[in-house]
Image: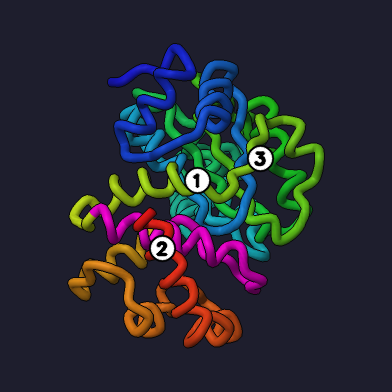
Amino acid sequence: MPSSPVSIDATAALLAAQDYVADRQLATAVFLALKLNRPLFLEGEPGTGKTEIAKVLASGLGAELIRLQCYEGLDVNSAAYEWNYAQQLLEIRLAETAHEARDRIAANLFSDRFLVARPLLRALQPHATAPVLLIDELDRTDEPFEAYLLEVLSDFQITIPEWKTVRADAPPVVIITSNRTREIHDAVKRRCIYHWVGYPDAARELEIVRRKVPDAKEALSKQIVLFVQNLRQLDLYKLPGVAETIEWSRALLALDAVELEPETVNNTLGVLLKYQDDIAKVQGSEAARLVERIRQEVAV
């Protein structure tokens, strides 16, 4: 199994081997999280590659990826563990039929035989290689769930009142992401190494497109990146992320485009932009203006 990288350069190389182009600051944050056994808290706009970090780390380290997708109303039963009440009830009935003592029945009910492990608990259980635990979009949950996470993030353990405290033999690699739809409590952030994942500059975004859409012509890739970079300068409700850049590149490749044309841009803006008001603002003369500007930039 691959071991954890021993330097920032090795960390950047590990990510690059999985076609993830990281800047120096991000590579440093990932390295420190691995070196210090600290959770890594990644905050930023949607589509900037936060979730992908966990995926490429799991692949690069040869570890299992355990994903907890957060949502409003997420509770301990869905995130950490729950008891198999149906199986417990069946056990009670069988024991009563066999005339077993009540104290013996009760003692057997709360054990790992009846415990259903959810992502948080699974990440703390023994593995050949420490898994990567992705707690994705934490900002979608309610604040009480953040409080529950503190024990996991501080001590890599979960206390199960009816049974025992489960501690990880080897701490998992924990990646937490947030799209900042609300502020995450300081108590969570203090337990993590924090990094803001912003939009990449043109050079890094072009390298990402080269790796993710290798069949696209170089000239087209440059035009795509410049167009998206210019879009991010506009007053739009939701700016396109790197994920949209990649998807748009694939869409234009599927349409056999060799360069950006105003008509093609107008017809495919729904791949880049997800709100009609934004599309209406860019379609037509604005799209034509950006295409012409980009052609001039590339020609220089």
Query: Which residue shows up at 61% across the image and 31% down it?
Result: 39
Counting every numbered tag in the picture gives: 3
In the foreground, 239 or 192: 239
Q: Amino acid at mark 3?
A: Glu
User: From the viewer's perspective, is residue 210 above or below residue 240?
Assistant: above
Tell whether label 1 touches label 2 (CB within 8 Å).
no
Compute the Cα span from label 2 to label 1. Answer: 51 Å
Q: Where does the image place residue 250, in percent across and percent down from the top left?
A: 28, 64
Secondary structure under the numbered disc 1 in the rendered image: helix
**Region of the chain picked out in magenta, as a range:** 218-244
User: From the viewer's perspective, is residue 218 above or below residue 112?
Assistant: below
Residue labelled with disc 2: 296
In the foreground, 89 or 267: 267
Q: Amino acid at mark 1?
A: Pro
Secondary structure under the numbered disc 2 in the rendered image: helix
Is 102 included in the stretch rendered in magenta? no
Residue labelled with disc 3: 162
